Image (cartoon, grey):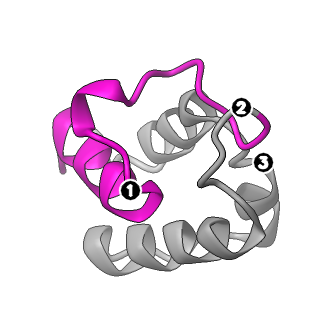
Amino acid sequence: MTSLKNLHQVISEVLRLPPDRITADMSIHKVDTWNSLTHIELVVTIEERFHIQLTEDEIVAMTSIAEVERILGSRGVLA
């Protein structure tokens, strides 16, 4: 399992934002660096770092940090 801090570090790397600026209310529609290409990069990075395979439905649903956290929590990835 990983911590929320570790997840936010991954997100900050992919979206090129400081880790302390990552908040649950951020979404693909509110972050300039979060577009279709970085979304795929985020998905691939999460799968590689946390050793999981996300479903198509999960990938499509991951349009906010809160949803990313919820999905990884439901998968038992977040502590």
Q: Is residue 70 magenta?
A: no
The residue that mark 3 highlights is 61
> Residue 6 at what x, y percent from top left?
18, 47
Q: Is residue 2 magenta?
A: yes
Judge whether residue 79 can be spotted in this image: no
Depth check, mark 3 against mark 2: the one in front is 2
**Which kind of residue does numbered mark 1 sit on?**
Arg
The residue that mark 2 highlights is 30
Position of 39 with respect to 77 (left or right) is: right
The residue that mark 1 highlights is 16
Position of 11 with respect to 35 (left or right) is: left
Q: Residue at x 24, y 38 (%)?
A: 19
User: Badge 1: few (under 14), some or many (20 or more) residues near its Cα, within 10 Å?
Assistant: few
Q: Residue at x 59, y 27 (%)?
A: 26
Secondary element at tag 2: loop
- Quadrant in which residue 63 is drawn: top right
Mark pair 3, 1: CA separation: 21 Å
Segment colored magenta: 1-29
